[in-house]
Image (cartoon, grey):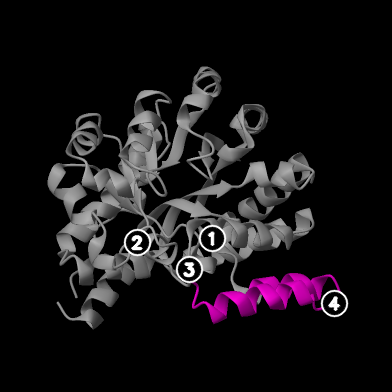
Amino acid sequence: MSATSDSAFIHRLPKVELHLHLEGSIQPDTLREMARRRGRLLEDTEQWIRDRERESFCYPKFTDFLNAFKLLSLLLETPDDYALATTRLIESLYAENVRYAELTLSAGVVLWKKQPLDAIFEAVKGAADEASGRLGVRVVWIFDAIRQFGVDHARAVMLHASRYRDHGVVAFGIGGDEERGPARLFVDVYREARDLGLHVTAHAGEACGPESVRDAIELLGAERIGHGTSAGRDTDTLHLLAARRVPVEVCLTSNLATGTIQRIEDHPLRRFLEAGVPVVLGSDDPGMFATSIEREMLIAAEHFALTRDEIAALAANAIQAAFLPENQRAAQGAQALSPVPNG
């Protein structure tokens, strides 16, 4: 296939996004729109944008990315800011033919900023309901805690998530610095989350070794692994992922931009597939990495010689990995993954 025909095929393919952070999705134009709505052009906004453009949306170290994400989050000052970010994100998903998305809200960062999490979630939920009703993109939510902030912080996020379980929050997870927040600290929190009816996920193997992935599965019972990159260099971890059918959310551009891999060809995507690991693609923080789910699919096709059938299989994996009841998964799959004509 030519790059042009790949692009056309991928654009038409109905898509599901499972690894997508609301805050990290925000595009520079949306940041400027937020500033204008406040009646002033914030220098902090322009500085953040200039810094990202100067670095070509790359980060020398993973901690540099975490700091940039923190600064971006500080630009979100009000529930209305979060609502605008939600609306613009769902509009961008619609433009890429995304039918279903599980959006991660960095609830832990909201609490760290001492902002009203209840009001912010109500704002994003209202914005999502309006945009989803208008555009036909179904959206649910994952609340994410910051693992280096400790157990009490994670439990607070989890309890907030459980309060909104009947209002579109389907899962709880942890992200951030794996080394300073190892999985073993959160065993009880994850057990409580499952007991409260939440699905559980975890970022793991992004900035630490394969043991971080194994611990997320064996200690926390994580149902999906975000990134999981280091698992590709350990046969036992690959076998564990494949045997337990734990999906890995692969974010190619993100891993390259944060230095998790040095070249796109170094990514273990093909090793995951050959080992039988369920793989889904995600854009992660598209506003911070200048990417999109379509671009991630195109990169996968170009750099790993994936066929159309393999790309379509990754899309099908995503609906199978979604945190939906079985009857809803079947219905969503029939709607979201309807046949795509050749072209």
Q: What element carries label 3?
A: helix
Q: Is residue 52 rendered magenta in the image?
A: yes
Marks 4 and 1, how far apart at CA: 27 Å
Q: Mark 1 points at which residue?
A: 65
x 49%, y 22%: residue:
187
Which is in the foreground here, disc 2 or disc 4? 2
x 32%, y 44%: residue:
248
Residue 240 on image: x %, y %: 23, 31
Marks 1 and 3, how far apart at CA: 10 Å
Quadrant of the rendered image containing residue 299: bottom left
The residues colored magenta run: 30-58
Q: Identify residue type, mark 3.
A: Phe
Dot 3 or dot 2, earlier in sequence: 2
- The answer to whether the residues at label 3 and label 2 have Cβ atoms under 8 Å apart is no
Other residues around mark 2 within 10 Å, as few (<14) / some (14–19) / many (≥20): many
Dot 1 or dot 3, earlier in sequence: 1
Q: Mark 3 points at which residue?
A: 289
Apparent side of residue 318 relative to residue 36 in the rendered image (left or right): left
Q: Identify residue type, mark 2.
A: Leu
x 34%, y 40%: residue:
321
Q: Which mark is residue 40?
A: 4
Q: Identify residue type, mark 1.
A: Phe
